[in-house]
Amino acid sequence: MNGMASIKEEISNYIKKKYEADPEYLWKRYPDYAVYRHDDNRKWFVIIMDVDADRLGLHGTERVDIIDVKVDDMMLRDILLKQKGYLPGYHMNKGSWITILLDGSVPYDDICNMIDTSFMNTASKKKKDKFRPVKEWIIPANPKYYDIEHAFDNTDEIDWKQGAGIIKGDTVFMYVGSSVSAVLYKCKVTEIDIPYEYEDKNLKITALMKIKLQKRYAPDEFTFDKMKKEFGIYAVRGPRGIPNSLSEALK
């Protein structure tokens, strides 16, 4: 990257690619001020501006490119404000926003990390779930309603009922109920939010996810009795996280 304009362009491209957000130009008086906000709760998570240096407490009166981001962690905020290139939030709540100079004093990767932080600090719960780090789940499968024991006989990828909170990239361990009562498969979630409507007296489905087989387990390897005695898993009625000890054992 060469120069401030290039940094601004790289940042705009980063936001567009990762968060599918376009800039909004809200003020006629400041036509270059670019606001980025969430499409659901409409909260701002980034504003890119150019202001006079002396308005930031800097020497000179030349125009300076800056980006404002929201930082809820006060300890992190205090640490950042002691570093070169970070200032209290200009034109925003100085208790929760910071300004980053786009003059090369803060590395591009660090700026992107702060954009990610700001995005999560202002996101709705639904969006936080979508962009959170991947995690591992145990999900139940009832052989009374679906022949899960033979689901992967002819393919390594199937559609499955999407569990609440599960996102693309998560790992799901499929626990097959009675009479198997054991974890049989490790799968990676490759797609979510596939429209699907189904309901009967036992089951309601509003969306599907695609899961890709990664590993098989013998029926006597991770039985319900073993998970209860060794890992504290006493029920698998819906998608649930797993303790680190079980995660390591399943690897």
Image (spheres, helix red, strand yellow):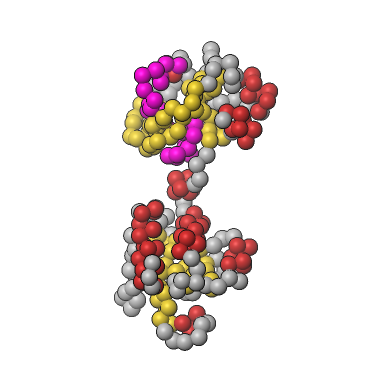
Nearer to the camera, 31 or 190: 190
| In this rendering, position of residue 156 left or right of residue 219 | left
Quarter of the figure with residue 242: top right
Task: Please name the predominant secondary structure of the magenta segment in the image.
Answer: loop
Left or right: 226, with 219 as reference point: right
- Whether 168 is drawn above or below 66: the answer is above
Quadrant housing the C terminus: top right
Is there any visible trace of residue 74 in the rendered image? no
Give percent across and percent down for residue 102. Answer: 44, 71
Residue that extends furthest to the right in the rendered view of this protein: 229
Residue 228 visible, this angle: yes
Return the residue nearer the eye: 181 or 95. 181
The magenta segment is 149-172
Residue pictured at 44% horizontal, 19% vertical: 148
Q: Position of residue 233 (x, y in %)?
A: 63, 27
Kindly identify the residue that appears in the image at 68 percent across and 23 percent down.
Answer: 229
- Whole-percent x and y of residue 51? 42, 79
